[in-house]
Amino acid sequence: MKSFALVAPGNFGWADIPVDPPPGPGEVTVHPVACGICASDLHYWLHGRIHDQVIRSYPFTLGHECAGTITAIGPGVTDLKSGQRVAVEPAVACGHCPPCLAGRENICPNVRFLATPPYHGALRETILIPARNVEPIPDSISFEAAALAEPLGVGIHATRLAAVAPGETIAIFGAGAIGFSVAFAARARDAARIIFAEPVPERRTLAIQLGFEAIPLSPDPVTVLRDLTGGGPDIAFEAAGDPQAMNAAVQAPRLGGKAAIIGIPVEDAVSLDIHRMRRSELTLFNCRRSNRTLHDAITLLTHTAKDMQRIATHRFPVHDAEHAFDLAARRAEGLVKAMLMLT
C-alpha cells in the first residue's frame, strides 16, 4: 500500500509498504484522515531512535495520533460499522503479561505501538487495529480534534497517576500538546491554578487565552513559581522532554509535593537535584503514554473540542510532512501541534 514514510534517515517520500491482511476476528481496518506530529515522531525523524527503539529498515511510516474512517469490519465485531468515524488508540497490548493483568497496559513489555519500530505508523492508506482500540466520535468533533484524543489521553493518565485533587495548584513545564493536555485534564479534575513555564511567547499567549497562567522558562522559573504560589505548586509536570525542564520540575514543588515526568529526552540519562528531592520528600512519577483513556478523552473532547482544537495551530497536507516536521522540531512560527491531513 502507499505510505508517506521516512524513505531514509531524515527524508520523507511516497513509498510502498506491505499491505495488511483483511481484518480478522475482533479487528477493523481504518483509513486515517488526520494525524498529529508527536515528539516521538520527531525523535525518529531526527535521530532514528528513542533509546533502544531503533529504526533498522526503511521505508518506515510515522504517526500515531490519528482519527479516520472504518473501511472494513472483522468477524465478531458487532458494535462498529463500516464508514464510522473513529479515533484510534495506537497501543496494542498483549493482555497476558503481569502489567496487563494489573490494568497497566501502557507498560506492557510486548506492546505493539503504531510508529514504534518495527511497527508502521498511521501515515498510510489504512491501518489494521483491534476493534477495542477505536472509539466512535460524534459528528460535533472534527477529525482534527479527534486526532488530539491520544495526547489528551496522556494528560488524563498523567493527572490520574499524580492524583491531581480539587483545589490544587499545578505547574506544567512546556506548553506543547502534552502540556495543554495535562492542563485540560487537570482543569477537569478541578485544579485551582494551572501555571505554564514556557519559553515560546506565542505558546504563553495561547495558554493565557485558554484561561491558564504562564511564565517564561528563564531566567529562574523555580523561584518565580515558588513566589507565585507561596512555596511551590502541589504538583509539577514536565512535558517538554528537556533535561533542564525535568530538573526544574523536581525542584519547583512545595515541601511534600509531587512531580511527574512525561517528556522524552534525547539523552539516555539526565541529572536531577537529588538533595531538593530528598529534603522535600518529593514523590516522583514517570508517565508512560496513556492507559486505556481513549473513551474518556473523547468524552472530555465533547466539552472542550473548541478550545482543545486551538492547540492544533498548523495544518499541512501529508506530502508537506517534511516542512511540518521541520517547523515542529524548531517550535517555529508559534507552532504547538502540527496536524497532517491525509485526505
Image (cartoon, rainbow, N blue to C red):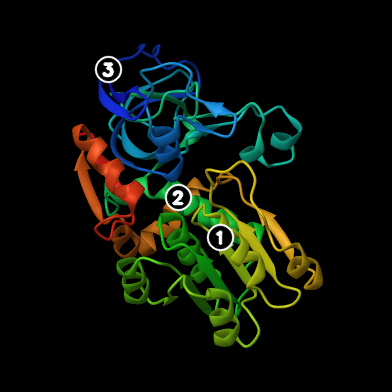
Residue occupying the far front of the picture: 219
Q: Earlier in the sequence, mark 3 or mark 1?
A: 3
* For marks 1 and 2 on the same chain, the one whose residue lies earlier in the sequence: 2
Earlier along the polypeptide chain: callout 3 or callout 2? 3
- The residue sitting at 42% across, 49% down in the picture is 149
The part of the image, by quadrant, that contains residue 184 is bottom left
Q: Which mark is residue 177?
A: none
Residue drawn where x is 35% and y is 65% of the image: 200
Q: Kindly identify which residue carries mark 1.
A: 244
SS type, badge 2: helix
- In the rendered view, would you say 35 is above or below 217? above
Image disc number at residue 151: 2
| SS of the residue under disc 1 | helix
Mark 2 closeness class: few <14, some 14–19, many ≥20 residues within 10 Å: many
- Against 191, residue 57 (above or below) is above
Q: Residue at x 34, y 30 (%)?
A: 10
